Image (cartoon, helix red, strand yellow):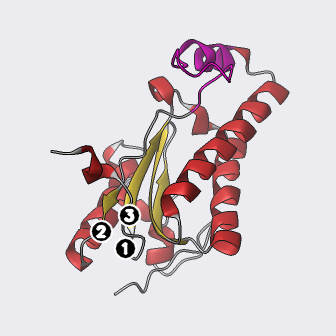
Amino acid sequence: MSRSRYRIFETEYPYFMTATVVAWLPVFCQPAMVEIILNSWRFLQRERGVQIFGFVVMENHLHWIAQGPSLAEQVGRFKSYTARCIIDELEKRGHKTLLEELRYYKLRHKVDQTHQLWQEGSHPQQIQGDEMMLQKLEYVHDNPVRRGYVDDQVHWRYSSARNYAGKPGLIDVITDWR
């Protein structure tokens, strides 16, 4: 299996992606940290032409399905920007232990930074049809249910399951992709 399997190379298709915090640290237990993610996605939608079809933000990782021009570049910028903002916010709020952990788990070759928020890569998988899109959306929306946080997907605040149920979500997503 070649490395290109997990690359964004055809931007006319949506991609399922994952971003995981180093060492699976629970950074997104605080609403302010999730808001940084949501605001960044809103910016990508408004200013960079990125279409988001689904998402979930858990305490230590997120999944999203998106499509857009230069998507690989946009994902890289998203991770870089959100990492900087989250680390700045953690410093502002005095979260010393979490910052020490983000420093401890930083990869050695990352010499230009003190902390590392995200694990490298986003493991993008091209969505190759309606069946795969439905499977990935179900997987995304079922994350908090599988973890035992909620009994119903719609009850998880940080997910697009609400959008798909016809309820207002925290960000707009494209639900009529068929």
Residue topped by disc 1: 13
83 drawn magenta: no
Residue topped by disc 2: 127
Above-or-below relation of 178 to 97: below
Overall secondary structure of the magenta section: loop
Quick check: can you spot residue 156? no
Q: Position of residue 99 (x, y in %)?
A: 68, 19
Q: With 149 as the anchor, is 117 left or right in this view?
A: right
Mark 1 vs mark 2: which is more N-terminal? Answer: 1
Crowd class of label 2 (few under 14; some 14 to 19; many from 20; radius 10 Å): some
Give the spatial CA distance, label 2 vs label 3: 5 Å
Q: Where is residue 59 in the image (x, y as percent from the top left)?
A: 52, 38
Q: Quadrant of the C terminus?
A: bottom left
Q: What element carries label 2?
A: loop
The residue at the point 44 percent across, 76 percent down is 164
Mark 2 vs mark 3: which is more N-terminal? Answer: 3
111 drawn magenta: yes
Q: Which residue type does callout 2 highlight? A: Ile
Residues drawn in magenta: 97-117
The residue at the point 59 percent across, 15 percent down is 101
The residue at the point 64 percent across, 65 percent down is 44
